[in-house]
C-alpha cells in the first residue's frame, strides 16, 4: 500500500492511498486532518498551527476554559463522576485533563479530545475550538 506524505506546519502527516485522513503526531498528541488532498492538508495544517501556537500553552488554556464549561456558575466547583459524585476545583480539573488529539477539516472546525483522568468514568472530553483558540462547545463523549 502506498503512503502519501506531506510536510506541514504541524510536522509530517501521512495518508494511505485510498485513505480518508492525513494523520501524524505532534509530540504525544495525535493530529488528524480530514481533507481530500495534500494541498488542502497544507492549508488546514497552517490554520490549525496558527490557532494552536505553542501546544502546551494551548492545552492549558483550553483545559482551563473547559472548567468554566463544566461549571457554569464558575470554575471553583466542577462536579465530576468519580467516587459516585464529587466536586473538584477548576484548577484541579484543568490540571488532570490531557490533550490526546486535534482534528480539523477544510470546513474550518477544529476539534480537540482530552483524556478525563477518570473524572467522568474514563470518557473523553470533546471540544470545538474557534480560530482564536476559544472553546465554542464541549461535551463528554464515549
Image: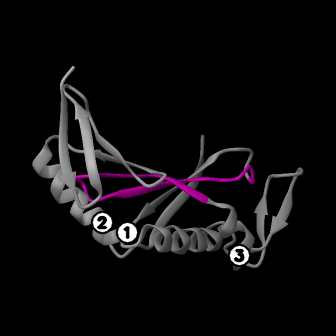
Q: Quadrant of residue 109?
A: bottom left
Tell me the magenta residue range.
98-119
Upstream in sequence: badge 2 or badge 3: 2
- Under circle 2, the secondary element is helix
Whether label 1 touches label 2, CB < 8 Å = yes
Q: Which residue is mark 3?
A: 91
Q: Residue furthest left?
A: 39
Q: Which residue is mark 1?
A: 52
Residue 137 x, y percent position in the rendering: 49, 63
Labelled disc at residue 49: 2
Q: Residues within 10 Å of mark 3 (few under 14, many from 20)?
A: some
Q: CA distance from mark 2 to mark 3?
A: 26 Å
Whether label 1 touches label 3, CB < 8 Å = no
Q: Residue furthest right?
A: 83
Query: Residue at point 49% right, 74% down?
Result: 57
Q: Residues within 10 Å of mark 2 (few under 14, many from 20)?
A: some
Upstream in sequence: badge 1 or badge 3: 1
Amino acid at each position: 500500500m502506498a503512503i502519501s506524505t506531506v510536510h506541514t506546519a504541524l510536522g509530517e502527516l501521512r495518508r494511505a492511498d485510498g485513505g480518508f485522513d492525513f494523520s501524524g503526531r505532534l509530540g504525544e498528541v495525535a493530529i488528524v486532518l480530514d481533507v481530500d488532498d495534500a494541498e488542502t492538508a497544507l492549508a488546514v495544517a497552517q490554520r490549525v498551527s496558527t490557532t494552536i501556537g505553542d501546544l502546551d500553552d494551548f492545552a492549558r488554556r483550553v483545559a482551563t476554559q473547559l472548567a468554566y464549561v463544566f461549571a457554569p456558575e464558575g470554575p471553583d466547583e466542577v462536579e465530576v463522576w468519580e467516587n459516585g459524585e464529587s466536586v473538584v476545583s477548576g484548577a484541579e480539573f484543568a490540571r488532570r485533563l490531557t490533550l490526546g488529539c486535534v482534528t480539523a477539516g477544510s470546513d474550518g472546525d477544529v476539534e480537540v479530545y482530552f483524556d478525563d483522568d477518570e473524572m467522568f468514568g474514563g470518557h473523553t472530553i470533546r471540544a470545538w475550538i474557534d480560530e482564536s483558540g476559544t472553546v465554542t462547545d464541549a461535551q463528554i463523549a464515549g
